[in-house]
Image (spheres, rainbow, N blue to C red):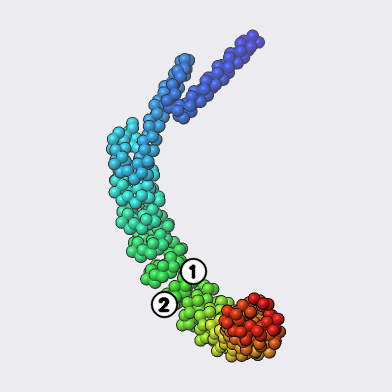
Amino acid sequence: MKRHRENTDNEQARNVRARAADEQAQIVRAQARDIALNPLRILPYLSPPSFRSVQSDLQSFAQTSKLNKNAVERAMLQRRAAKNNDLKTLKQLTEDDNSFGGLKVRDEEVTWWAAKNSNSRMLRYATEKGYPKHSLVTLEAAKDNNLEMLRYATENGYAKHSGVTEWAAEHNNLEMLRYATEKGYAKHSGVTEWAAEHNNLPMLRYATENGYPQHEDVTKWAAEHNNLPMLRYATENGYPKHCRVPVWAAENNNLPMLRYVTEKGYPKHSGVTHWAAEHNNLPMLRYATENGYAKHFGVTEWAAEHNNLEMLRYATENGYEKPSEVTRWAAKHNNLEMLRYATENGYDKNYYVTKWAARRNNLEMLRYATEKGYYKNYDVAKWAAQHNNLEMLRYATENGYEKPSEVTRWAAQHNNLEMLEYALAQGYDEL
């Protein structure tokens, strides 16, 4: 029993010593982490002989950490030199004391900054000196529209960035696009759109023949640029038929293009008849109407604004809307024939028709508008007096038009005594 108790006591003592050793080892590891974060800390010496091997390893680790810290500082200086486009300093940092304990210092961003700064000499130097080949170098070359740098980077094993072909197309650089395609760069989905946006049919042909994705906006850009050959090519090669193509044909006043896209089944945009009328293009309006394009509400107003009675007749006979501005434009253009036509065909009687009849000094139009029940505008008598037209003033007064105060002033200004006496007799305000 006594021996058993002694064995138990010895085992407990061993456990205590083991726990103490574990705690001391944890302290050492904590000191190692401390040194890794700050290699300049003074290394503590551990007294127990059992930890001398750990202490030796720790001292070695501290020296390595200090070495790594210096290497990181040198790498940051290299990066700064490249960022500042300073090749001279980069060479000094690379060639002078560029090895620490057999470790060469080469910052990973040097080649990227060389390309970003469009510095071909620095890129060549960094590549030859073994700096890491940054994945964005080819992209920066393409963004800078620098084909020479792109060739160099490609030939020296830099990563082929997926955005290179897009930048080649965005810069409208067919030579770069050809090179990138032949060297196996990814075929970006935006290349065909950039070709069309730049109105570059040769680039669009090349991209299409080399399997680039067919962007949905290609036909839109072709129509917007009023480029029928490009639109034909895109349509014949299966590009999507953009819904705005017909309206661009009409906006560009291009009837042959409108005929083509209509025959090829492009969507019939509601704005086509509007642009036909705005361009005062009756043949286009006839074609669009006969081919089922929507009847835009502003067509008859554009016809009247252009003083085009023939277009107004056509639009009216084909069921286009009848806005009130049509009669105003007829009167403003002093076109009694158009005003008669619009009135007889149910167009709204605009508030300003009698004013424009008087302003144009057209008594016949004023008589017609008054007889047809147009609104008696306040300014009619004023314009009659301003034109020194006593006959119109008599008509306006006898037909119940307002009596503005300016009438007597204009009569006096024209030195027209007869008009002045008439106005005063009819109750117009005195001067």
Q: What residue is rendered at 68% in x and 89% in y?
A: 371
Helix, strand or loop for disc 1:
loop
- Residue 287 can be seen, yes or no: no
Residue 85, picture quadrant: top left
Structural crowding at the residue carrying mark 1, measured as other residues with C-alpha within 10 Å and reported as few (<14), some (14–19) or many (≥20)? many
Q: Image height check: is 77 above or below 191?
A: above
Structural crowding at the residue carrying mark 2, measured as other residues with C-alpha within 10 Å and reported as few (<14), some (14–19) or many (≥20)? few
Q: Position of residue 229 (x, y in %)?
A: 41, 77
Give the spatial CA distance, label 1 vs label 2.
Answer: 16 Å
Q: Amino acid at mark 2?
A: Pro
Question: How many labels were placed on the picture?
Answer: 2
Q: Position of residue 164 (x, y in %)?
A: 40, 58
Quadrant location of the N terminus in the rendered image:
top right
> Viewer-proximal residue, 159 or 341?
341
- Residue 66 can be seen, yes or no: yes
Q: Amino acid at mark 1?
A: Asp
Q: Position of residue 158 (x, y in %)?
A: 36, 51
Q: What residue is rendered at 65% in x and 90% in y?
A: 368
Quadrant location of the C terminus in the rendered image:
bottom right
Q: What residue is rendered at 57% in x and 82% in y?
A: 415
In this image, 89 relative to 376: left or right? left
Q: Which mark is residue 217?
A: 1
Helix, strand or loop for disc 2:
helix
Q: What residue is rendered at 36% in x and 35% in y?
A: 74
Q: Position of residue 196 (x, y in %)?
A: 43, 69
Q: Which residue is mark 2?
A: 229
Q: Earlier in the sequence, mark 1 or mark 2?
A: 1
Q: Which mark is residue 286?
A: none
